[in-house]
Image (cartoon, rainbow, N blue to C red):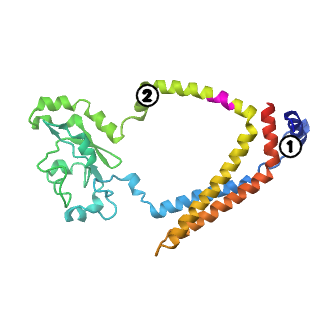
């Protein structure tokens, strides 16, 4: 069938509406009805993912901080902390970053972000100098005898240091401390991911503008290449894509079945049922995909003829 014949056939199939057909009395019908099964399968998959995530996940990790030992502040049973800390763990919902200054290293931003600790409040380490040195039951990575003479701002359970309030007069070299204090806040925010999203995006665009220009030019070239493919090779590309999707579904089902056979031979394995269900669902999806493809095959070829003619 030529492109012209395909267009004429398409016109005959979808007759032109008259003025009396427009409005509430216009003829209407459902299109692509078989795809409702694919749409429903996607929704079922999304619901399954949500159920598994709610059952096995820990939503508190999204809203609460996590110390350097992997404990979520104020939730669960902590490991690696002293008995006194464990006794008050339910109230320890403030994640403190042990920022301090020394003449040799300046502000220890990297170590402070690497070794945060869950405190009763953001001011606890400032009031109690031993609050951090008595935190872990093992070796303390921060050290002892440190003073934290600065205020903090609470954001999402995190104690963000206010470096402008850092009292450099208590250090061995106040002038050097004040010099290091300039710009350290932005460095801390950048490392912690708290800097302004808009400003960070603008800075990235400014420093990588050439990437955007090159990408735009490549898009233009690829668009012309794609037009050539649609004009000359649309049918082979469409057919190959349809078969590749089917092959991917079959291979995915085979991979799930292989994992099922391995889990079936493992004693007390609870994952074999999940792999078996995934195998069945994937192969059913492949079967429905074949049925839909056969049902719509003529329409797909007509669409390809129209694209080639256009």
Q: Which mark is residue 54?
A: none
Residue displayed at 25% across by 34% down: 184
- Report if residue 274 is visible in the image: no
Residue displayed at 28% across by 53% down: 68
Q: How many marks?
A: 2
- Residue where numbered disc 2 is placed: 202
Residue 44: give x, y in percent of width and height: 62, 59
Residue 179: give x, y in percent of width and height: 18, 28
Residue 137: give x, y in percent of width and height: 19, 61
Residue 96: give x, y in percent of width and height: 26, 49
Real-space CA distance between mark 2 and mark 1, rounded to the nearest whole angstrom? 51 Å
Q: Is residue 272 above or below residue 60?
A: below
Q: Residues within 10 Å of mark 1 (few under 14, many from 20)?
A: few
Residue displayed at 60% across by 61% down: 254
Query: Horizontally, is 14 left or right of 176 in the view?
Result: right
Q: Quadrant of residue 150?
A: top left
Q: Secondary structure at mark 1?
A: loop
- Residue where numbered disc 1 is placed: 26
Residue segment shown in magenta? 222-226
Please name whichever residue, 279 or 97, is drawn nearer the observer in this view of the structure: 279
Find the residue positioned furthest to the left.
172
Please name whichever residue, 155 or 225, is drawn nearer the observer in this view of the structure: 225
Q: Quadrant of residue 16?
A: top right
């Amino acid at each position: 069938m030529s492109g012209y014949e395909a267009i004429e056939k398409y016109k005959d199939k979808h007759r032109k509406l008259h003025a009396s057909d427009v409005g509430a009395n216009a003829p209407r019908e459902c299109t692509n009805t078989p795809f409702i099964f694919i749409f429903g399968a996607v929704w079922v998959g999304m619901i399954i993912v949500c159920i598994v995530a709610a059952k096995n996940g820990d939503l508190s990790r999204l809203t609460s901080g996590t110390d350097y030992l992997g404990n979520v502040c104020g939730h669960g049973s902590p490991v690696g902390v002293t008995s006194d800390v464990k006794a008050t763990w339910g109230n320890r919902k403030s994640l403190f970053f042990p920022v301090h200054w020394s003449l040799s290293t300046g502000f220890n931003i990297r170590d402070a972000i690497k070794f945060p600790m869950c405190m009763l409040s953001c001011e606890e380490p400032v009031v109690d100098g031993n609050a951090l040195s008595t935190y872990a039951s093992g070796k303390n990575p921060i050290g002892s005898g440190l003073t934290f003479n600065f205020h903090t701002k609470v954001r999402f359970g995190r104690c963000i240091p206010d470096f402008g309030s850092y009292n450099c007069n208590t250090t061995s070299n106040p002038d050097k401390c004040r010099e290091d204090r300039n710009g350290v806040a932005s460095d801390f925010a950048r490392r912690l991911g708290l800097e302004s999203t808009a400003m960070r995006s603008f800075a990235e665009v400014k420093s990588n503008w050439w990437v955007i220009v090159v990408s735009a030019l490549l898009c233009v070239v690829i668009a012309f290449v794609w037009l050539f493919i649609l004009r000359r090779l649309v049918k082979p590309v469409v057919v190959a894509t349809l078969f590749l999707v089917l092959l991917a579904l079959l291979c995915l089902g085979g991979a799930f079945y292989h994992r099922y056979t391995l889990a079936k031979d493992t004693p007390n394995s609870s994952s074999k049922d999940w792999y078996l269900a995934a195998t069945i669902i994937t192969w059913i999806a492949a079967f429905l995909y074949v049925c839909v493809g056969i049902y719509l095959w003529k329409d797909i070829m007509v669409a390809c003829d129209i694209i080639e003619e256009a």
